[in-house]
Image (spheres, rainbow, N blue to C red):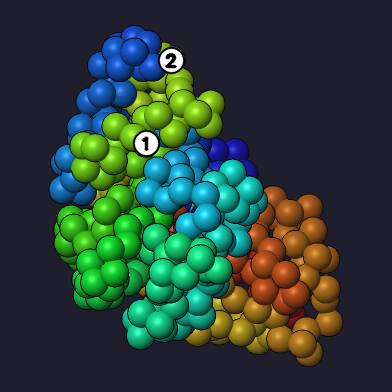
Amino acid sequence: MDTLDFRSDTVTWPTPAMREAMATATVGDDVYGEDPTVNELEVFAAELLGKEAGLFVSSGTQGNLIAALTHAQRGDEAILGEDAHIFCWEAGGLAVLGGITPRPLPTDPQGRMDLDQIRSAVRGDNPHWPRSRLILTENSSGGNHGAAIEPDYFAGIRQIAEEHGLRSHLDGARLFNATTALQIDPKTIAQHVDSVSICLSKGLCAPAGSVLVGDRDFIHQARRTRKLLGGGMRQAGILAAAGLIALQEMTQRLAADHTNAQRLAQGLAQIPGILINPEQVQTNMVFFSLADTVPILPQDLMAKLYDTYGIRLGSYGGQKFRAVTHYWIQPHHVEALLSALREILN
Ligand code: TLP
């Protein structure tokens, strides 16, 4: 990459190995189910997560939307965290395209809903009310410092879903960051939910795409929902080839991003005027704020960082910022950001 971009791990360019694999990928028409590379990716992703089948989709947003529209019908309700990406950052797709009412619940600093509150939110059968149908979860929790949530939370979700005949979906856009931080097999979390959507194009560097996994019947229905949403792609093996490298190789190196994030957090904590708790940093996201006493506006800080140092940072409203580490961020890039901030805030 030719810029120092900390805004997100979505900015990552494909690796040289990915570009090579894409150039030589075997392809076919995937709407006919005839693209061997897409088929291989779908099988690989499903096995990695201990599910029966997979479906290659264009994005994390599309994976979540297809899951929700497949699990639930118009008039149904989905229980989810009030800071969940699906609720806050996906253009209201649940309601707009699915006719599904979101039922947002508060979350703790790890991004977990309270299990008793979920239980109380499940509605009985009453013609006035939407039908409780779906529980939506997220791991790592992007709205909560990229927190990595332990499997026992998902075991609790599963128990509630079983008690009330609900379906469950996990937005696993960065599931491998969470499982790397927790040093566990992703199956130990995926086993507790009906479906999982994983992103290939964030810290894993593929240029596009996500995979939705679940049981065979669910994925069969999801394929129809994908078509409905205009998501049937043709020679998508070119993208799936990069996706295979994402899952086979890039998942193995995420700990390096977490070390860089920790290094960044520790460095930020030493800079007067910056507010951060490095203990909150578990994966590749570093959220921090400017103290009110700092005599520079957040937008001016961003502009100066970019204009003078060529560094991009994510703005999260008010005095809050996000820096995300990824494959294209090396330890000396972390140093460059720290020294730029030291100079600007000095
Ligand atoms: N998140 C993006 C932005 O939309 C905020 C980012 O830079 O973090 N689930 C989670 C947890 C996500 O963080 C994202 C992307 C998605 C789903 C959506 O993925 P895409 O962008 O592929 O639709």
Write the residue at 37% across / 30% down. 223
Q: Is residue 285 visible from the viewing direction of this image?
A: no
Residue 226 in the figure: left or right of residue 163: right
- Name the image quarter holding residue 206: top left
For badge 1, the amino acid type reads Ala
Question: Mark 1 falls on what kind of element?
Answer: helix
The residue tagged 1 is 222
Count of residue discs: 2
Q: Quadrant of the N terminus?
A: top right
Q: Earlier in the sequence, mark 2 or mark 1?
A: 1
Q: Identify the disc placed on residue 191.
A: none
Query: Which dot marks residue 234?
Result: 2
Q: Amino acid at mark 2?
A: Arg
* Residue 108: image location, x then y, percent: 45, 83
Up-down: is 191 above or below 38? below
Residue ID at (38%, 49%): 71
**Would you say 292 lies left or right of 216 here?**
right
* CB of mark 1 near ligand 1 (< 8 Å): no
Q: Quadrant of residue 255?
A: bottom left
Q: Residue at x 39, y 60 (%)?
A: 134
Work out how far the residue at label 2 is from the one at label 1, CA to CA, in angstroms.
17 Å
Q: x and y percent of residue 175 in the render?
A: 33, 56
Mark 2 vs mark 1: give the one in front.
1
Decide if residue 224 is on the left or right side of residue 322.
left
What residue is rendered at 63% in x and 48% in y?
96
Rate crowding at label 1 as few (under 14), some (14 to 19) or many (20 or more) other CA atoms within 10 Å.
Answer: many
